[in-house]
Image (tube, grey):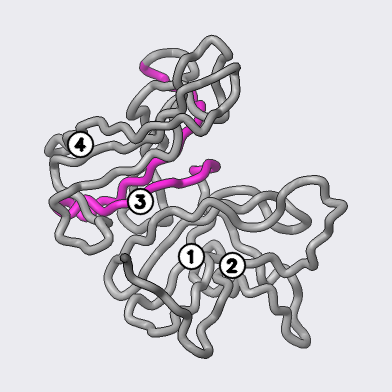
Amino acid sequence: GGKSFTRRPGMTAAAATLPYPYDPRAGRHTGYFSPSNIVRWRNHAYVFVFAEQYREQRRGACLLRAEAAADNPVWRAWDGRRFTIALNGIVKAGGTRNQHICVPVPGIGSTITSVVRHAPTGTFLALFAGTRAVPRLNRKVTGIFYVQSKDLVHWSPPALLLERPIMFKFACGDKVVFGYPSLIDGNSPSRNFDTVGEQLSLYLTRFNLTGCKLPMNRDLVRYPVHIMSGS
């Protein structure tokens, strides 16, 4: 079969953990979840993780960065100005737990599932599934939204890409719902497909509902996407 992977001696096992001991009485999941794909830019690798609110940790999408060429990359989270936060759960003598929690990137508030860089313009595109007010439609819409950025920190207001029922907001009368949106350009020169051109595809997992529950009966679907010049 396929290839096997082993961790090098001395490599860090965890990329992001809370600085608090696990509390089984919390009654809900806590920590960092749902990492996006890794996107490379200049000399660094970036990834979004979603933080749930717990003690001093605020809820939202956190951005992590590591040196792209490092054999044992050390991820640092954005602190509101720079990438200085070590999410390793270790509080050194004289330090505080607040020094080891991330600051969510403003203006997103949802789980980022896909991040790519539009090579012709250098603009980053990120996707999330959710419900947002769409001014041009004068109503709230559930579906797939995108945001744009030049630096991965400052993002545009969300714009609707595709209106669809999604896996955490649907009606029992819906026959299918969607989740895990990703943008992929099959002709990308990047080995990780983290760059796109003008023609690309939106990939989604389609859940074929049974009894108003998310089943294991799922399909991978694809929609063509064209990025218009100047958009």
| Quadrant position of residue 17 | bottom right
The amino acid type of the residue labelled 4 equals: Ser
**In this rendering, is residue 222 above or below 40?**
above
Quick one: label 3 or label 1, which is nearer the N terminus?
1
Circle 1 or circle 2, nearest the eye: 2
The amino acid type of the residue labelled 3 equals: Val
Distance from disc 1 to disc 4, alpha carbons, whole Å, reads 27 Å
Judge from the rendering whether residue 94 lies leftward or rightward of residue 209; answer left or right. right
Quick one: label 1 or label 2, which is nearer the N terminus?
2
Query: Label 3, on which residue?
Result: 115
Query: Label 2, on which residue?
Result: 16
Query: Label 1, on which residue?
Result: 64
| Quadrant position of residue 170 | top right
Whether tag 2 and tag 3 are in contact, CB under 8 A, the answer is no
Distance from disc 2 to disc 3, alpha carbons, whole Å, reads 19 Å
Q: Confirm whether the magenta stretch covers residue 153.
A: no
Distance from disc 4 to disc 3, alpha carbons, whole Å, reads 17 Å
Judge from the rendering whether residue 213 lies leftward or rightward of residue 166; answer left or right. right
Circle 1 or circle 4, nearest the eye: 1
Is residue 207 or residue 195 the one in the foreground? Answer: 207
**Mark number, residue 231:** 4
Quick one: label 4 or label 2, which is nearer the N terminus?
2
Question: Could you tell me which secondary element the residue under label 4 belongs to?
Answer: loop
Whole-percent x, y for residue 60 in the image: 58, 48
Whole-percent x, y for residue 191 in the image: 23, 63
Q: Residue at x 84, y 55 (%)?
A: 24
Structural crowding at the residue carrying mark 3, measured as other residues with C-alpha within 10 Å and reported as few (<14), some (14–19) or many (≥20): many
